[in-house]
Amino acid sequence: MLELKNLSFSVVERDEDHHEQQLDIIKDMSYTFKKGKFYAITGPNGSGKTTLSKLIMGINKQTSGGVYFEGNDITHLSITERAKAGIAYSFQHPARFKGITFRDLLAIASKTDDEEKLLKIVRRVGICPLSFLDKPVDSTLSGGEIKKIELATTIARNPKLAIYDEPDTGIDLWTITPMVALLKREQVENKTTTIVVSHNRSFLEAADEILIFNHGEIIYEGDLKKALPILADFRICNFKPCPEGEKDAQCFR
Ligand SMILES: Nc1ncnc2c1ncn2[C@@H]1O[C@H](COP(=O)(O)OP(=O)(O)OP(=O)(O)O)[C@@H](O)[C@H]1O
Ligand SMILES: [Mg+2]
């Protein structure tokens, strides 16, 4: 349902001496996400997970390659056009807005301001109390609260493809399990194709397929069992090679 064809994203950086250097952040990536499946993308910090998510949503513009959604070429479509086609993205760092409440965001996402329908959505999502409805989505919200609101707003769009970028960041321990169950329920009951970017084992266990990124490439695709040795391999996380005679644990950057 979502196909990445030789997708690349590079930026040009200038150092103090004005020398230009090309940084390849996503490298010639090809992958097909299947309809109704649950994917977890994990990998070291800086490996390109958010960059890829934003390429799919159209927030980043690819350097080369293409993105196909339900058989249609969406490579050059805007964010709004991709949202209309049924793709939703939950930001790793959600925006805050002065003068806007959770109710406003939900109403825009679900295209209704009917009180009963809004309450139904909040109950369906479950992780936000009803008292959240009139909370302003501004700097007064806690880190976990804004992530819950971001996730609820994404679900309220009823997307065909939902991408959640580290939905568990800042989320309390009591909410992680219900959050995983909620995203699984959306996958199973609403056939939502789900991509969760996460470092959290609970999401990896919930996934049908795990992708491990490193340096802008997919270095593993498959189940959790075979992923475990890779997740335990410190060399992947850009740790410094160990000097002779020193223990691994002393070699962290
Ligand atoms: N527009 C940009 N200009 C320069 N560098 C960028 C740009 N976008 C991303 N990067 C760099 O590309 C790398 C990948 O960033 P990205 O945010 O995709 O990582 P990530 O895998 O999501 O990491 P994390 O686990 O920390 O969220 C980082 O080193 C980042 O600094
Ligand atoms: Mg990220």
Image (spheres, rainbow, N blue to C red):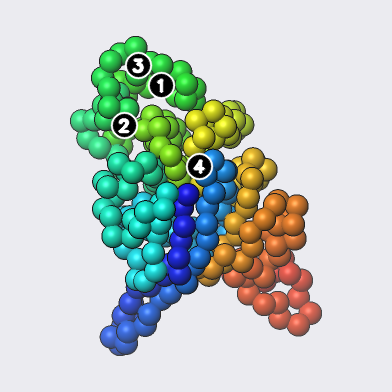
Q: Quadrant of residue 236?
A: bottom right
Question: Which amino acid type is marked by label 2?
Answer: Ala
Q: Residue 219: where, in percent of width, then height?
A: 61, 66
Question: Which amino acid type is marked by label 4?
Answer: Thr
Instruction: Give the class, few, some or many, for how many residues have Cα within 10 Å of label 4's Cα (few <14, many ≥20).
Output: many
Check disc 2 and report the residue beneath it: 109
Nearer the camera: disc 4 or disc 2: 4
Using the image, determine if residue 16 lies above or below residue 63.
Answer: below
Determine the secondary structure under disc 1.
helix
Check disc 3 and report the residue beneath it: 117
> From the viewer's perspective, is 175 left or right of 146?
right
Check disc 4 and report the residue beneath it: 193
Question: Which amino acid type is marked by label 3?
Answer: Lys
Q: CA distance from mark 3 to mark 4?
A: 24 Å
Determine the secondary structure under disc 2.
helix
- Residue name at image x 67 percent, y 70 percent: 235
Badge number at residue 170: none
- Residue name at image x 38 percent, y 80 percent: 22
First in residue order: circle 2 vs circle 1: 2
Instruction: Give the class, few, some or many, for how many residues have Cα within 10 Å of label 2's Cα (few <14, many ≥20).
Output: some
Determine the secondary structure under disc 3.
helix
- Residue name at image x 46 percent, y 52 percent: 2
Q: Residue 1: where, in percent of width, then height?
A: 47, 49
Q: Are marks 3 and 1 in contact (CB under 8 Å)?
A: yes
First in residue order: circle 1 vs circle 4: 1
Q: CA distance from mark 1 to mark 4?
A: 19 Å
Q: Are marks 2 and 3 in contact (CB under 8 Å)?
A: no
